[in-house]
Image (tube, helix red, strand yellow):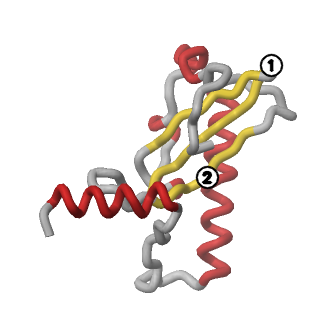
Amino acid sequence: MSSDTDYDAALSRWFSGKTEAPDDSDSLMSPAANNAAQLEAIERVQGWVRARFRLQPDAAILVSEVACKLPGCPPLETVVAFWENEQRHHFKLFKPVADVTLDNLPFAWMKETLIVPEGFGCECC
């Protein structure tokens, strides 16, 4: 199968919503421990986002890990969205949420560039 055909097949699966999550069968952690570690990583990133962008304590922050099977796409990426003054902001980090560090977040001065314009057709968050 050529790389063009592989790409087309992956793209078709992605648009149809038939992508599979990465295989965690080689994970040494139990499912419960894995869920606890995942939740801890998500909460850590949420805290960093709140502090970095000086968000109010009640501001909604969404951090999620998304699997991607498209060629050239990282197998897991972290999607972050937050709302402030009825405006949605978002960005992606091309690594699993457990691997995200504070230095991976956009700078605070970039906050306005993260605003999603009204009517923008973003499927990720």
Which labelled disc corresponds to residue 85? 1
Which labelled disc corresponds to residue 64? 2
Element class at badge 2: strand
Q: Is residue 27 above or below residue 18?
A: below
- Circle 1: residue type: Asn
Q: Quadrant of the C terminus?
A: top right
The residue lying furthest to the right in this view is 58
Q: Could you classify mark 1 by the number of other residues whose Cα lies within 10 Å: few (under 14), some (14-19), or many (20 or more)? A: few
49 vs 59, left or right, is left
Residue at 39% in and 59% down: 12
- Circle 2: residue type: Ser
97 vs 33, left or right, is left
Q: Could you classify mark 2 by the number of other residues whose Cα lies within 10 Å: few (under 14), some (14-19), or many (20 or more)? A: some
Q: Is residue 59 above or below residue 25?
A: above
Residue at 81% in and 32% down: 59
Residue at 72% in and 39% down: 61
120 vs 54, left or right, is left
Q: Quadrant of the N terminus?
A: bottom left
Q: Earlier in the sequence, mark 2 or mark 1?
A: 2
Element class at badge 1: loop
Query: Residue 13, percent across and down?
Result: 42, 63
Query: Residue 70, percent across and down?
Result: 34, 56
Query: Residue 19, percent across and down?
Result: 47, 66
